[in-house]
Every structure is written in C-alpha cells, then in structure tokens.
Image: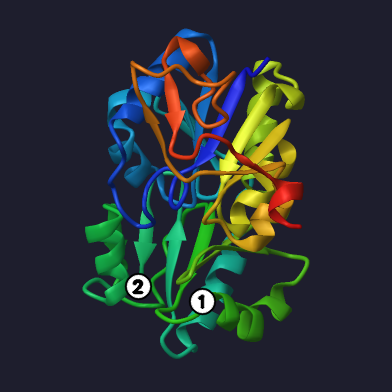
Amino acid sequence: MVKLIMTDIDGTLIPDGTMDINPEYFEVIEKLVEKGIIFVVASGRHMSSVKKVFAPVLDKIWVASQNGNVLTYHGKSRIIKSIPQEWGREMWRQFSKLKGVEGVLDTATEMYCPFEETSMYKILADEYHFNVTGTGGWNQVPEEDFSMMTLYHPQSAENICKELVEDKWKGKLEFLTSGKYWVDIVMPEVGKGTALEEICRQLGIAPEETIAFGDNLNDISMIQSAGKGYAVNTAREETKKAADEVIPLFCRLTEKKPAEPICPICGLGASVGCECRSEHSTRRDESHK
C-alpha cells in the first residue's frame, strides 16, 4: 500500500522554469491527503517559489526544497546539513573568476546573489518568482548557514562545473545538475533521496510504501530510494535507466472514464477516474530494448 508520494516539480509536474501548474493537481493532492497519503514536493527551487506554486494546498503537503536539503511542513523549515561558511566564501570567490558564471547562495529562508538586474536575477525573480536579494558584489557574503549554492551559466553550467569547479571540491561537496543552466551544490549525502528517507523515518513509513517521480539527474537518488520510482518520458536517459518505469508526462482527470487499477501518477485509481495521456506506462525493460 502506498503511504507516501514524492514528486519533482520542474519538468515533471510543470514546464521547466514556470509557475504553470494544472489546478487539477490540487484536487488530486487533497484526495490523496484525505486518504491518509503523505504528499511531498521535492525541488531544487527555493521555498519562496514552491509556496507560490502550491499555495492552495501548502498546509497539506511536505516540501523538500533546495534539492531536499530543507524540509518544510506547516511553515516550519530546517536544514538537514549546512555548508560551512568558509567553504561558501571560497566557492563564491571561485565563481567570481569564471567568465559568464553567476551564483546563488541559499539559506533556509533567503536567497542571495551578487548583483540584481543580471540575466540570472531576472530569470529567478520573473520566471521562478523567487524572492532574491542582491548583496552588492561577490565580496559581500551573508553571515548565515548556507543550505545550498547554485552555479548558473547561460550555455552549459554542467560542463563548466566539471571542468573548472568540481575537482577542487571532490569529496567535500556534491554537484547536482538540476537543469541546462543550473548546477546545485550541497553537502555530501544530501539530496532528494535523503529527504525522502528522513521524512519516512519521522513518520514511520517503510521505503516500500513510497513512490517517487522525476526527470533530471537530481531526481535519481529519490527515485532509487523509493519503493517504486518513475521517470517521465521526457526525462534524461540516466534518470530513465534509474527508474522502475517510464510514464507519460502529464495526467488529467475525468469523471467519465475510470482508470485502470491505480494510476502511478496520482495514485488514486477508479474512485476519481484518472486517465493518463497514454493509456499504459512503458516499463523500463521495454523502453530500453
């Protein structure tokens, strides 16, 4: 029996970098909670953005923001593992020397970047609706515990990170690709999978009683930690290979047509009448023949 559902946001529930969630998902979430199922959204986004997307059901769900390193429930947030201040400052200096690179420093409640009115700042503020504060320069680093750092580059953040940043920090920090322009940096053994395990520990839920959905590299730990992991059919190949099944991207609800047994997307089945865009999910072994 499924007791907990955990899902990525960007590229899984909504188009990447938007606030465009289908309002029918809120009905699904409310029905799941009524059935006693825990619903968790897990994202590289900061809580300031997540709470805007999920405002109608925010009091009913858990949020694992900043790639799972900050857990929030009923308005109370905590960092699972903080980045040491001196590491954050040194990484910030390293970012400042890389051409075309911008960066973000996250705390449990705030987001900081060196400058406002840059291309990255506009993306964060206008598209993701983050509450971002410009510090006034790379030398201005807030005196707070850091939950996550993010490297941004408009062409290839992942390659720049591998070539210029990762070697120096290997074994100290982990680098999680969360999109074409973004690499999130967290402490080792921190991620969406860690968040899933921590919530299960708190609530006394066994891993086999959970399911998870995702599309990107930062979703793999969550997919592997869950009792059953699903990748959407637009996911990266590495994520599809880590998943138990590959499923259609969107789910829509109808009242007329009952579902086949249990919809892997909404977990509700015939009581609501769920009809996925594709009638049947594609199993991993079939999709990789």
Relative vertical location of residue 194 with respect to residue 172 in this rendering, above or below: above
Question: To which quarter of the image does residue 54 belong?
Answer: top left
Quarter containing the C terminus: bottom right
Question: Which numbered disc covers residue 157?
Answer: 1
- Secondary structure of the residue carrying tag 2 is loop
- Secondary structure of the residue carrying tag 1 is helix
Relative vertical location of residue 118 with respect to residue 88 in this rendering, above or below: below
The CA span between labels 2 and 1 is: 18 Å
Q: How packed is label 2: few (under 14 Cα within 10 Å), some, or many (20 or more)?
A: many
Question: To which quarter of the image does residue 88 belong?
Answer: bottom right
Q: Name the residue under label 2.
A: 114
Q: How packed is label 1: few (under 14 Cα within 10 Å), some, or many (20 or more)?
A: many
Q: Where is residue 69 in the image (x, y as percent from the top left)?
A: 57, 45
Quarter containing the N terminus: top right
Q: In this view, does 30 lie to the left or right of 158?
A: left
Residue 189 visible to the viewer: no
Q: What residue type is labelled 1?
A: Ala
Q: What residue type is labelled 2?
A: Pro
Q: Where is residue 52 in the image (x, y as percent from the top left)?
A: 28, 39
Relative vertical location of residue 52 with respect to residue 237 in this rendering, above or below: above
Question: To which quarter of the image does residue 167 belong?
Answer: bottom right
Confirm or deny contact between disc 2 and disc 1 (CB under 8 A). Answer: no
